[in-house]
Amino acid sequence: MTNLPGIVITGASGRMGQMLIKTVLDSDKAKLVGVVERTGHDWVGRDVGACMGGADVGVSVTDDALAAFAQAQAVIDFTAPAATVEFAALAAQARAVHVIGTTGMDDEHLAKLNAASRHATIIRAGNMSLGVNLLVQLTKKVAAALDEDFDIEVIEAHHNQKVDAPSGTALMLGEAAAEGRGVDLADVRDSGRDGITGARKKGDIGFTAIRGGDIVGEHDVLFAAAGERIVLRHLATDRAIFARGALKAALWGQGKAPGEYDMIDVLGL
């Protein structure tokens, strides 16, 4: 047990934070050495097992991220863009692999992550599941095979507490479709339709976001032409798939050179 890679989970009280903590505690390939929450949170200073409604596990929640990271070989982070950027600098300082599942990043956030990756191993993906990453590869291949007579629409659905849209996975799929067609997504992205928008522009890649209930994650890539449609679909029913993928990434990253990686690298796709 003592030789297993030590993992720190950030955003301990969140849905994914708690799922990640449980996944690491249940694993025989890693050990939980720290959990981080924001300053002032009522979990800080308490045993995380008790906070989650179970028995003590011997790990207290802290708001001192650097001290926690210093004990770890990897940090798994599903929080918010601003927090993730700060954690990236601290993980680089601690020489810990930083696995990022945070979505909603803008160009400024990504630039800061790129700077941190010069000194640290960063593995970032909008979705950590095997199925979604296979879907990304399929989307790229289908988009490359079809011409602009096929409109492409990425349709995603998530729970009503998700704060960003389109989802990180939807953007991964849109990027894959754009890459398959040999175009830049920024030049063909069509989202947020409302009112009299006019006819759809040929070659655009559209996005539709649905929010409701407790939907874990549903993603369709629709290729629609006159007289026919192709639909590629992935449905997630359990957040555990993302947690297992993130832990796989944390273990894969051990000993890797500094740089930015994604789940395609981790899964060897």
Image (spheres, helix red, strand yellow):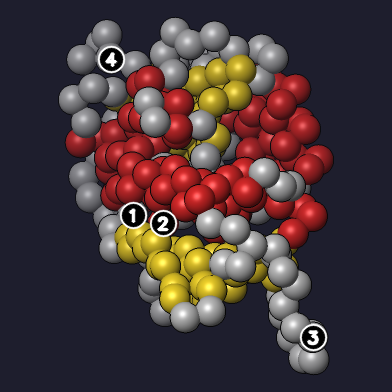
Rounded to the nearest angstrom, the CA distance separating label 3 from label 1 is 38 Å
Instruction: Say whether disc 3 or disc 1 marks the residue closer to the N-terminus.
Output: 3
Query: Which quadrant of the rendered structure holds the N terminus?
Result: top left
Amino acid type at circle 3 is: Gly
- The answer to which of 66 and 46 lies nearer the viewer is 66
Q: Is mark 3 on a helix, strand or loop?
A: loop
Q: Please name the residue shown 39% across and 36% down the image.
A: 246
Q: Mark 1 points at which residue?
A: 239
Q: Mark 4 points at which residue?
A: 4
Q: Do the residues labelled 2 and 1 touch (CB within 8 Å)?
A: yes
Other residues around mark 1 within 10 Å, as few (<14) / some (14–19) / many (≥20):
some
Q: Name the residue under label 2.
A: 15
x%, y% of residue 30?
28, 23
- Give the vertical position of 81 relative to 171 (above or below): above
Query: Which quadrant of the rendered structure holds the C terminus?
Result: top left
Q: Mark 3 points at which residue?
A: 198
x%, y% of residue 28?
18, 25
- The answer to which of 82 and 199 lies nearer the viewer is 199
- Viewer-nearest of discs 3 and 1: 3
Q: Please name the residue shown 71% across and 26% down the image.
A: 114
x%, y% of residue 70?
53, 16
Q: Can the viewer see residue 162?
A: no
- Viewer-nearest of discs 3 and 4: 3
